[in-house]
Image (tube, rainbow, N blue to C red):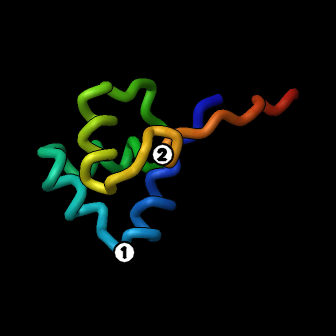
Amino acid sequence: MIVINLDVLLAKHKTTSQELAEYLGITPANLSILKTGKAKALRLHTLNEICRFFRCQPADLLEYKEDELL
């Protein structure tokens, strides 16, 4: 599964979800969906803007983890 480490980047850069949401032009509720891992998709434009905001690479935000077996 793909994990979105947005909370890690926010903490590392000492910024708030509100600041990022305003920069991206999305609601804090939509950013929260992304931050909590409940998002089913991530637009490349949004990924690009997050990387621009944090001056990071996509790999700093996205991580692959093996799915847990039941």
Q: Secondary structure at mark 1?
A: loop
User: Residue at 30% of width from left, 46% of height from top?
Assistant: 50
Q: Quadrant of the N terminus?
A: top right
Query: Residue 50 vs residue 11: left or right?
Result: left
Above or below, comparing residue 51 to residue 17 in the picture: above
Q: Quadrant of residue 45?
A: top left
Within 10 Å of disc 1 (Cα), the crowding (few <14, some 14-19, many 20+) is: few
Amino acid type assigned to the residue bearing label 2 in the image: Leu
Q: Residue furthest right?
A: 70
Label of residue 14 in the image? 1
Q: Is residue 20 left or right of residue 37?
A: left
Q: Position of residue 21 (x, y in %)?
A: 21, 53
Q: Is residue 18 above or below residue 31?
A: below
- Where in the figure is residue 14, as x and y percent of width and height? 36, 74
Q: Hey, what amino acid is under mark 1?
A: Lys
Above or below: residue 58 compared with residue 70:
below
Residue drawn at point x = 36 percent, y = 50 percent:
32
Looking at the figure, which quarter contains the C terminus? top right
Q: Tell me the residue at 40%/42% (across/down).
A: 34
| Among numbered discs 2 and 1, the one appearing first in the sequence | 1
From the viewer's perspective, tell me whether residue 36 is left or right of residue 66.
Answer: left
The Cα atoms of the two marked residues, 2 and 1, are separated by 15 Å
For residue 54, which quarter of the picture?
Answer: bottom left
Q: Is residue 70 left or right of residue 13?
A: right
Residue named by callout 2: 61
Q: Could you tell me which secondary element the residue under label 2 belongs to?
A: helix
In depth, the one of 6 and 60 nearer the eye is: 60
